[in-house]
Each structure stands twice: as C-alpha cells, then as structure tokens.
Image (cartoon, rainbow, N blue to C red):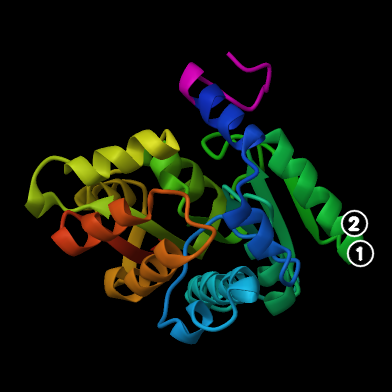
Amino acid sequence: MSTNTSVASHYQGSVADYWNREANPVNIELGEVDGYFHHHYGIGEPDWSVVEGDPGTARERTTRELHRLETRQAVFLLDHLGEVRPDQRIMDAGCGRGGSSFMAHDRFGCQVDGISISRKQVEFATEQAKEREVEGKVAFHLKNMLDTGFETGCMQAIWNNESTMYVDLHDLFAEHARLLARGGRYVTITGCYNDVYGLPSRAVSTINAHYICDIHPRSNYFRAMTANRLVPTEVVDMTEMTLPYWRLRAKSPLATGIEQTFIDAYTSGSFQYLLIAADRV
C-alpha cells in the first residue's frame, strides 16, 4: 500500500504508483510544445504531411500535430461545460499534469481545482501554476475524487477527462453530485465498452491491463448518473473523431505499442469513445 493518504485501497495505491513513475514522451514531449501538458487522447483529422519529408525533423512535426489534436479534444470538452462566471469554481477530477485546468482558467477566468492521487502529477502542476503566476486561481490537490473533502455545493462544473475507468461510477457520481451546485454541469469524455458487444473484448482487456484500469460498460454511466441526480443532456459518440489520432500516433516515433489495440477495439465496435454532459438536478 502506498503511504499516499489520498488512496483508499491497494488498487488505488497501484494506480498512484503507476502515475508517479510515468514519464512517457507521448505525454511529456507533447506538453513541451506550448506548456499545456495533457493526459488524454486527440480528435480530428490530422495533417498527414507531418509523416513525410525530412526524417530528421519527423519527430518534432508529429509531436506538434499530436499535441494539436489533444488540445482540440480538451477544447471540445470545455465547450460542453456551459456558462461559467469568473466568480464561480470548477473542478478537474483526475487532472494529470494540469493542461485542461489551465485551459479552463484561460477561458472562464474562474477558480479551478485540479485533483489527483498522483503526488508527482500534483507537484508538477503546482509548479506550472507558479510559473504561470495563477497559483491563486488554479490549485492542485493530492485528493481522492471519491472523497475530496470540499464543501457541498461549491462547484459550478466538474469534469473527468479519461479518468472514470479508475473508480466505481456510483461512488464517483455521488461525490460529484454532492459537490455540484443545483443546475451545475458535469462532463466526461471516456472510453467505454459497448454493451451490445457483450463482455469486454480481448482488445479492451489489453487496454485495461496496459493502464491498470477497469473500463466500464456504456450503460453503467447512464445508470450511475441518473441514480445520483445527474441528468444526461448530451451524448456525443466521438469514436470516429478519435480514430485518425490513433492512426497518426501509430505511425509516429512516439508510439508506445498500444496504438493498434485501440484501433482494433474502436473499429470492431467493441469499444466507444463518448462525451456525456449532464446537469445536476
């Protein structure tokens, strides 16, 4: 068990340890393009010319293009958070190294709280906030998203960007519903397995093993949301939007070896990439 007091189980300790050790170039080098470090995937059609031309500069070109697609994904999520005033407060649940938190503050000018069970991620993001001189408005906390300790009703919006597969959905949405003000907005972008397909496919199981996660079936999201006063208002199937990103990444010098598994899972229909927006009632 990790000594991290934000973890509540051996499993959470193993997840925290994984992200404390993680220093993958596909995360670090992309963030160095403009200082926004993401821990999620991309959407949109790539500029395929980046894989052509001088091999000596191929890595730089591909890195910039992958980062552009990942930033576009974050913008798409923030577009669904609704109206947020500068005097309100929002939360990035599973914030990684803070890229989306900073983008949210840039857009809304409000207080943003990012939480992670990875001490390394929180320290990295906190240092970024100091360098950006926004530490009074963007704060990062070593906390468990299932039990944050924040006061009830304090958040206007909350999002999970590819982080729900590490927790029980009923426990997660109960805490989010507690934190959200009435009428507040919750948004998640997530990979989920298709209930119509049946049990998780071999590709989905491989992804689970690679990231030490537990991908949920699509239906569990809606069941857990409605049980916790989160009413879905918009659902976007982003599967076709993310496939080009994976095909570019598979051809890039930054490929990690999991790319073809994602492509196979998406194209087989066993795996979907969804955005779900819900209102707290």
Residue at the spot x=68%, y=71% of the render?
103
Q: Can residue 117 be seen by looking at this rendering?
A: no
Residue 154 relative to residue 220: left or right: right
Residues tagged 2 and 1 counted as in contact (Cβ below 8 A) = yes
Give the quarter of the figure containing the C terminus. Answer: bottom left
Residue 245 relative to residue 105: left or right: left
Q: Amino acid at mark 1?
A: Glu
Foreground of the two, 276 or 49: 49
**Residue denoted by label 2:** 130
Residue at the spot x=48%, y=56% of the render?
255
Question: What is the x, y in percent for residue 105?
Answer: 72, 70
Q: Residue farthest to the top?
A: 1
Write the start and end of the magenta stretch as one range: 1-11
**Residue denoted by label 1:** 133
Q: Callout 1: few (<14), some (14-19), or many (20+) C-alpha neighbours within 10 Å?
A: few
Residue at the spot x=52%, y=24% of the render?
14
Mark 2 secondary-structure assignment: helix
Mark 1 secondary-structure assignment: loop
Foreground of the two, 233 or 268: 268
